[in-house]
Amino acid sequence: MRYFFIILLFICSCTSNTTEVSNVDSKVQDILSKMTLEEKVGQMAQINLTVIAKGPNKWGSSFPLEIDPKKAKKALVDFKVGSVLNTINNTAQNTETWYKTITEIQKYSIDSTRMKVPVIYGIDAIHGTTYTAGATMFPQQITTAASWNEENAYNMALVCAYETRASGIPWNFSPVLDLGLDPRFPRQFETFGEDPLIVERFGKAMIRGYQGENNDISNKYSVAACMKHFVGYHAVISGKDRTPAYIPDNVLSEYHIEPFKKAIEAGAKTVMINSGLINGVPVHADYNLMINVLRNKLGFEGVILTDWEDIRKLHDRDKVAKNQKEAIKMAINAGIDMSMIPYEYEHFIKNLIALVKEGEVSIERIDDAVMRILKLKFELDLFNNPVTNFEEYEDFGSKKHHQLAYKAASESITLLKNDDNILPLKGNPRILVTGPNADNMRTLNGAWTYSWQGDLTDDFAGDYNTIFEAIRNNFGSSNVKYVPGVTYRKGGNYYDLDEVDISKAVQEARRSDYIVLCLGENTYTEKPGDLNDLNIHKLQTKLAIELSKTGKPIILILNLGRPRLISDIEPLMSAVVNVYLPGNFGADALSDIISGRVNPSGKLPYSYPAYPNSLLPYYYKPSEVQNNAQGAYNYVGEVNNLYEFGYGLSYSDFKYSNFAVSKDTFALSDTINVGVFVTNDSDIDGYETIQVYSSDLYASITPDIKRLRDFSKVHIKAGETKRLSFSIPVSELEFYNIDNVPVVEEGRFKITINDNVKEIYIR
Ligand code: BGC
């Protein structure tokens, strides 16, 4: 008998997971089999909150958030819309308002419809819960990548999931898995930078943070993640948002698809499609990318969502569909499950129903899409728990969460220049803090902060410190003066600046020991952030030059979403610190670095260009460097960076020794073991990131000059030596050949850590 029970227990424990899965599947099938075509198509529609909120226009501006009963009944009951997104007035709401709003929405969809299918609410919470007042705002992804520590991405996602659920919302349009390889692109800050391995690792960490350890998103602290934007979104020719890209298949596979592949393996539940075009085909109409690649090759089983209004754009913008109805047919037949319409839902729903009746879209395609959407709703437990209650989330906006955001910022901020070890500042110095980014919470956070473009941050972030305030806190108010010199124009475009008092700043500089000059960018994202000139604004250059004439040492703080060119002024600076977009606690972290309480440890997740016509990631091809060996000509077309990818200084001094690779020759099935000793040859404890690169010396298509294969950030005490070892399977040195097949070709490779190089042979 005892044995029988043990066996029974064993069988139960082995099958419980499968039982749960098949339970969900059978519930989905049961509902699906009872649904009418109208009910099914409604599930595929996602509308903007303003469509059902009181308000005068599409954006619902000037009203407090209230659901309009007439509009809500029409959308949610008559048309059975299955999903809602976004906020109203383009602004953050408090957790209580979110709870009330989503509770009301669910009443329409559950109490007043035949099938009682709850709405799934989705939001963009990309560095913290963007649209909720009081939420913890972390550094943006680009900043987090500079920490070279995935734990920071995980913490951000964990806190963000918690605070998004505290806002009643179960679905987050994050993480961004796009490759941020173009400094001109207005969304580079939303990425983890230019390296595919970093994007892959940090992306996976975020999925784990959002969806929990077992991807159990029924848990009230987890949200469904949405990988975006599949795929190749940033690789455009013009550098501007949503413009054409031309990407060969093997390049797409090598650099862009891989991070999505890893996130799918990690269990990501949903994906959003690239709003742009590749090789002339809008991705929203690309059957090959959505079905052949995403579904069949990568095995993605979750929901495929459009980006904003992107079915419409197949007709309006890209001119590949003769009318809206054809656009809907193209997108749904190419694999779209849910359309972020987000306004004219009647049109979408009626047309899609007609297309099915006319045999232009099969009912099997509709069932397939709705099956995935219902499954997501079951997995999120929305049928039992359609809205989570803010009262059950006592850690919302807590000190505990703030500390994690501070930690991420303090590990990310990157010291790029430190002449004569001017930093940390010693003694009791008089400091002038100046520049348009000096007293500005908005610029510390970037876009997607309490509003889409980040323009409302000052209304919400008054409790946190600007750079000026944080420096004053550390160095005392009598020692620290603030004169802006130049400001961003209130109500202007993100690129508008005004000169206010440069001469006053210069006067104050003369009375100071140090100048902390805070330059960079105002906030932007998407089309409004497109750029015509990568140079930093000329008024900022003017301020820097005028200040430098005082002869006082200048510490340049860069607060920007993408690396704007500073080559003209950089030689005039004694120190340069890149804070990127470090969030609400970034200024505190910066001030602690300036005062020496924190030893900087960030490293660039992108190549910082020196010139507008030299914009290449660190993994460029050998032919980019063709300088004539005899020196007869001096070619300018070299790779010209101001600071290299992976670069960043510390107050400690790290020395590398005893570099070793396990053998000289490896088989394809082998693992390459690499070891190195790192000594902290200074009297201050610090973090160092050890980076392992490989170079394929000869290959059937021209190889990358080098590729990051592994990295590890370690704490090394003053005077201490640590031995680091890395194991890299030979298979990870593969590249996609001309036939888009991943291969490791026989031949010579180099393995590099810092200045240490070892050549190996792979057969
Ligand atoms: C952006 C997406 C975002 C969506 C919903 C789009 O314009 O491209 O990244 O998730 O809007 O707000």
Image (spheres, grey):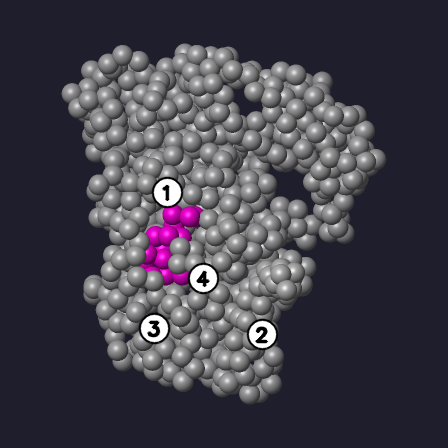
Looking at the image, which residue is at 71% across and 18% down?
Answer: 630
**Which is more foreground, mark 2 or mark 3?**
3
Q: Identify the element where label 4 is drawn.
A: loop
Residue 575 locus on image (x, y percent): 39, 20
The CA distance from mark 2 to mark 1 is 37 Å
Q: Which residues are magenta?
A: 157-170
Q: Quadrant of residue 620?
A: top right
Q: Nearer the viewer, residue 395 or 688?
A: 395
Disc 4 from disc 1: Cα separation: 25 Å
Q: Is residue 422 above or below residue 727?
A: above
Query: The residue under label 2 is which amino acid type?
Result: Asp
Mark pair 4, 3: CA separation:
17 Å
**Are the residues tagged 2 and 1 within 8 Å (C-beta)?**
no
The answer, for residue 157, to whether it is visible in the render is yes
Distance from disc 1 to disc 3, alpha carbons, whole Å, reads: 30 Å
Residue 455 appears in the rendering: no
Label 3: which residue? 106
Tell me how far mark 2 sits from mark 3, CA to CA: 24 Å
Mark identifier at residue 138: 1
Q: Are marks 2 and 4 in contact (CB under 8 Å)?
A: no
Q: Quadrant of the C terminus?
A: top right
Disc 3 secondary structure class = helix
Q: Earlier in the sequence, mark 4 or mark 1?
A: 1
Mark 1 or 3, nearer chain start: 3
Report the mark closest to the observer, 4 or 3.
4
